[in-house]
């Protein structure tokens, strides 16, 4: 086994252990499952009250929420994965061993994807149990989408690693992460808000231009934003549109490769010293 | 050479941190790398480990040049530096085993046990490393550096924060390592420890290597020799003048009682028998003779002051 | 992770602020009416038409491909109505056709020039379902003439009926009097009400018929003087459904007047135990959600709810419903007409029963036609599908029908707590192992 691979495995194993022995993983899983439970509970209550409920795509919303939560959690984890140990000096100590940026980034990506798999390993059986309890079907096609979903989460992790590598401090990294989240969410929310501006408004003409800018940004984000990829991928799986599922997965893998290369460049440039 | 640098220079903007450094470390020697705070010692270590790219110059380790991006050579090096207070949630044992895995050591547990017992961390090996005291973290750092049996040990302030007992443990461990054929590069400003262990020293000041030699060589270069004290029963009248006339007596002071002579001798040859003969011929009775070498601290201060004076145009 | 939480909180607050800010604070007041160039739109949808219009504030018109829609350039009074955030037309105050030729271009190339044509749309209602048919040119004139003849005939029949009813009332009164006088008299039979005309026409109008392939086009009106009419430049988006299948209007026994729609093949029909559901089959199509919304109202400013939307369309009648449990077909239902009978007496409620045209108190027409499904116990589950006369399963017609199992709430939320319990066990065990005494740490 090559030295890099051996080192990456050792670091990845350690990072996974760290995640398993920390509270944030379990809290995130609990929030995801709780969200899904609430949605399902609402459906059963609605049937009781009105006699009929058409449940569009059962478990799609709960699994989308779970996948999105896991993606954001891992993106946040990745954002601190390099910046915080670098701030504290422990990244320098790690590099006393035969570690290089490639093995470190590979290990962190591997660890994050393993934690994501762990997340799904716990979440999906819980939803299967809920499916039995409330007698709503868990579509097999959705499970296929979940199998492919690591490809949609990967760009979020890679973006987090890039931010972590390029930021000077862990505080700076969190700030950049916040900017990225605001950008991803804010473009959509801003576009939605601007659509509500009445034509008779005195600001209409100015805001119309801004709205078109946001619409273009939104279209671009569909291919870049991990959350958009998650949504598009699960949707494609439910429609059994394997071509679109493959395209979304390839976009995710390609995107994460690009961000990882940038992260490697940033880490070499900024270094591992506090 | 185990370590060799050639005109190593590191500049941050206009600030010159390391200036044309040419140092060399021989196999199986303990090399003391000295300098005041801010001299550039840690920066030099970072460059040796390829954690920093120098502005110019080169580094060779084990005879091979260190190229940008190379990292595999660190498998042959053990580094003990001040451990950060905030380590991961690992126990001491887990941390060392982690590094053993990183350096591709299979089944390191036996060696780890030996090191933990030697440095008296065995009883706390399963405690979280972040709960260790500073001294314990220093010892853990040394264990981590030694677990993979490196050929070169780089130590940055290895005894900082240790009590005398801990210092002795660390010193014995380093000596045992060198006796097994390992090479040690110690960076420190605790000169007494370097004086005890080092075969050669290099003195760094403002990024510039002022001198690199053995301790004796250091003293000789400075031109100040051995301090010699003679205790007499009484001071013979002619003794002082005769001693001052000797070319190898650089300085002579007599105590008020006249019974204690302190001399600074030119250390090229051992002149103690000649002094003893002069005292006897002068009619003095020697009650005691004591030879004191110039301490490393004195040598260090002298050398750095000289450099400051030289730089200031004095 | 504290910093992470703080940043996420700030991001969400900013998002909430953005969603409230510009739209809410922009000044929106009712404007004075003003004359404006608009496009009147009769947008074709499968088996029907949607009437709407596009004022200057609507930069694009949305129409379906491979169907004939009609747009009419007109001048009318519009005024901004802040309650709905839209410009409302006042057709009664001003409704002038704007003469000219409609130019349609794509990527800068002129693809069509359309002159105004006579048209009429006739809407027919049957069994609660409205369908529409468009007539163009000479056919429009003929169709309108036929409609007007039917209308006149119905008017005459109605007049005859009213007269006959008056005569019948008089005869009944006379019969009652004679009966009271001790005579044996047959009560005359009431006259039959004439059948409703069942058709509505929007009249004979002038408009430009449009039937194009999917794509993005530009339209403008060139006036008789050769100049482009100001305000007539718009985008024209022609779109088509992505997929089609079978949808259902699901009529629950407990609220038959408010059925739910199940257009998507991914829907699950969740019904209450001890109830009946009635499934009206439809042709369903999947449209781009935003385009579909703007087809119906070009001024709509609501944000996209989803990228694609399934929509129920015209009725589907040539199929049989199979109810499958496991691998076994437990029931096969034919499309059955139903009537809704109010329960007699002081009891409130109604009963859904098969339509019996021959019954004395039968309504004129069934309330709806559907496939019945009976749900009994909690936890039941079925698969349903439509099968053609040839035995083929209609694509997209499969649905799962489930009855909730109604577990106690506590059991549901215990499941949500399980990950925390696992985490607590793992972390506590670990912490016990690594705990160090103060003496050892000294």
Image (cartoon, grey):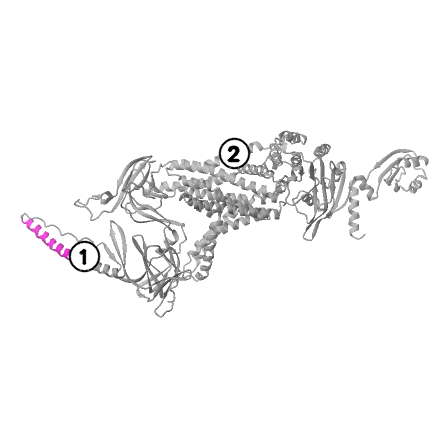
Residue under label 2, please give it.
Answer: C426
**CB-based contact (under 8 Å), mark 2 and mark 1:** no
Chain to which the residue tagged by mark 1 belongs: C
**Where is residue B314 shown, x and y percent of the image?**
81, 52
In what element is the residue under mark 1?
Answer: helix
Quadrant for the N terminus of chain B in the image:
top right
The answer, for residue A153, to whether it is visible in the render is yes
| Badge 2 density bin: few <14, some 14–19, many ≥20, Cα 10 Å | some
Front residue of C88 and C104: C104
Q: Quadrant of residue C329?
A: top left
State the image quarter where residue B130 is shown: top right
Is residue A116 positioned above or below C288 on the image? above
User: In this orientation, does residue A169 appear?
Assistant: no
Tell me which numbered mark, 2 or 1, is placed earlier along the sequence: 1
Whether labels 2 and 1 belong to a single chain: the reply is yes
For mark 1, what is the residue?
Answer: C154
Measured from the top left, where is residue C72 in percent x and y? 32, 62
């Amino acid at each position: 086994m090559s030295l890099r691979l051996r080192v990456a495995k050792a670091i990845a194993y350690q990072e996974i252990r760290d995640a398993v022995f920390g509270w944030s993983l379990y809290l995130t899983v609990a929030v995801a499952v709780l969200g899904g439970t609430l949605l399902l509970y609402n459906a059963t209550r609605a049937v009781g009250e009105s006699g009929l409920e058409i449940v569009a795509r059962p478990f799609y919303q709960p699994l989308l929420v779970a996948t999105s939560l896991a993606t954001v959690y891992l993106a946040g984890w990745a954002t601190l994965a390099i910046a915080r140990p670098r701030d504290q000096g422990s990244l320098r100590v790690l590099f006393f061993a035969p570690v290089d940026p490639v093995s470190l980034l590979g290990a962190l990506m591997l660890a994050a994807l393993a934690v994501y798999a762990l997340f799904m390993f716990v979440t999906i059986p819980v939803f299967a149990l809920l499916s039995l309890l409330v007698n709503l079907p868990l579509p097999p096609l959705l499970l296929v989408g979940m199998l492919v979903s690591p490809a949609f989460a990967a760009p979020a992790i890679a973006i987090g690693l890039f931010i972590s590598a390029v930021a000077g401090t862990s505080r700076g990294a969190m700030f950049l992460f916040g900017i990225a989240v605001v950008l991803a969410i804010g473009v959509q929310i801003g576009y939605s808000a601007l659509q509500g501006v009445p034509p008779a408004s005195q600001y209409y003409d100015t805001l119309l231009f801004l709205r078109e800018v946001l619409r273009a940004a939104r279209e671009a984000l569909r291919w870049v934003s991990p959350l958009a990829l998650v949504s598009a991928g699960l949707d494609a799986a439910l429609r059994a549109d394997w071509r679109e599922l493959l395209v979304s997965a390839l976009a995710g893998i390609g995107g994460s490769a690009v961000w990882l290369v940038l992260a490697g460049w940033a880490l070499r440039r900024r270094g591992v010293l506090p | 050479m185990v370590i060799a640098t050639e005109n190593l220079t590191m500049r941050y903007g206009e600030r010159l941190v390391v200036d044309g450094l040419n140092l060399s470390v021989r196999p199986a020697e303990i090399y003391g790398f000295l300098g005041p705070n801010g001299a550039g010692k840690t920066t030099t270590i970072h460059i040796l480990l390829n954690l920093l790219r120098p502005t110019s110059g080169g580094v060779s380790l084990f005879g091979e040049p260190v190229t940008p991006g190379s990292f595999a050579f660190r498998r042959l090096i053990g580094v003990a530096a001040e451990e950060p207070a905030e380590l991961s949630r690992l126990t001491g044992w887990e941390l060392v085993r982690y590094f053993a895995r990183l350096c591709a050591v299979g089944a390191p547990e036996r060696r780890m046990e030996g090191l933990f017992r030697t440095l008296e961390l065995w009883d706390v090996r399963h405690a979280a490393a972040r709960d260790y005291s500073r001294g314990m973290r220093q010892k853990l750092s040394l264990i981590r550096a030694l677990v993979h049996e490196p050929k070169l040990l780089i130590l940055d302030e290895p005894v900082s924060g240790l009590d005398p007992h801990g210092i002795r443990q660390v010193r014995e461990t380093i000596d045992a390592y060198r006796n097994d054929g390992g090479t040690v590069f110690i960076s420190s400003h605790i000169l007494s420890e370097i004086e005890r262990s080092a075969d050669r020293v290099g003195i760094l000041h403002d990024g510039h290597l002022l001198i690199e030699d053995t301790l004796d060589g250091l003293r000789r270069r400075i031109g100040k020799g051995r301090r010699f004290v003679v205790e007499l029963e009484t001071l013979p009248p002619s003794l002082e003048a005769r001693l001052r006339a000797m070319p190898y007596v650089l300085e002579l002071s007599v105590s008020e009682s006249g019974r204690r002579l302190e001399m600074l001798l030119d250390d090229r040859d051992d002149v103690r028998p000649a002094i003893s003969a002069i005292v006897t011929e002068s009619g003095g009775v020697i009650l005691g003779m004591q030879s004191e070498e110039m301490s490393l601290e004195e040598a260090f201060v002298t050398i750095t002051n000289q450099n400051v004076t030289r730089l200031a145009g004095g | 992770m504290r910093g992470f939480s703080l940043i996420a909180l700030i991001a969400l607050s900013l998002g909430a602020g953005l969603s409230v800010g510009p739209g809410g604070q922009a000044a929106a007041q009712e404007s004075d009416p003003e004359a404006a160039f608009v496009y009147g739109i009769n947008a074709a949808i499968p088996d029907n038409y949607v009437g709407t219009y596009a004022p200057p504030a609507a930069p694009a018109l949305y129409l379906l491909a491979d169907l004939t829609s009609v747009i009419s350039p007109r001048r009318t009074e519009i005024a901004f109505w802040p309650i709905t955030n839209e410009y409302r037309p006042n057709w009664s105050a001003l409704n002038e056709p704007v003469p000219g030729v409609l130019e349609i271009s794509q990527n800068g190339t002129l693809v069509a020039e359309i002159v105004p044509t006579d048209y009429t749309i006739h809407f027919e209602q049957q069994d609660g379902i409205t369908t529409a048919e468009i007539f163009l040119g000479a056919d429009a004139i003929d169709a309108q003439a036929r409609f007007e003849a039917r209308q006149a005939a119905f008017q005459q029949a109605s007049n005859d009926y009213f007269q006959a009813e008056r005569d019948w009332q008089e005869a009944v009164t006379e019969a009652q009097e004679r009966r009271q006088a001790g005579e044996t008299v047959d009560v005359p039979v009431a006259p039959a009400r004439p059948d409703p005309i069942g058709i509505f026409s929007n009249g004979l109008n002038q408009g430009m018929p449009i039937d194009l392939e999917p794509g993005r086009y530009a339209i403008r009106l060139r006036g008789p003087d050769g100049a482009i009419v100001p305000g007539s430049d718009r985008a024209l988006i022609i779109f088509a459904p992505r997929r089609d299948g079978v949808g259902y209007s699901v009529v629950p026994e407990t609220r038959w007047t408010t059925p739910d729609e199940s257009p998507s093949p991914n829907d699950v029909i969740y019904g209450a135990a001890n109830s009946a559901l009635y499934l009206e089959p439809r042709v369903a199509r999947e449209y781009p959600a935003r385009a579909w919304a703007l087809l119906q109202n070009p001024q709509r400013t609501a944000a996209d709810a989803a990228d694609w939307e399934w929509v129920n369309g015209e009725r589907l009648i040539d199929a049989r419903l199979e109810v499958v449990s496991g691998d076994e077909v437990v029931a096969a239902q034919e499309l059955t007409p139903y009537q809704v009978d109010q329960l007699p007496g002081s009891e409130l409620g109604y009963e859904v029963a098969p339509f019996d045209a021959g019954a004395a108190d039968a309504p004129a027409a069934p309330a709806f036609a559907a496939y019945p499904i009976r749900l009994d116990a909690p936890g039941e589950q079925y698969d349903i599908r439509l099968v053609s006369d040839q035995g083929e399963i209609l694509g997209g017609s499969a649905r799962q029908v489930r009855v909730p199992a109604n577990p106690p709430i506590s059991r549901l939320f215990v499941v949500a707590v399980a990950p925390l319990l696992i985490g607590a066990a793992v972390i506590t065990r670990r912490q016990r192992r690594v705990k160090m005494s103060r003496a050892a740490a000294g």
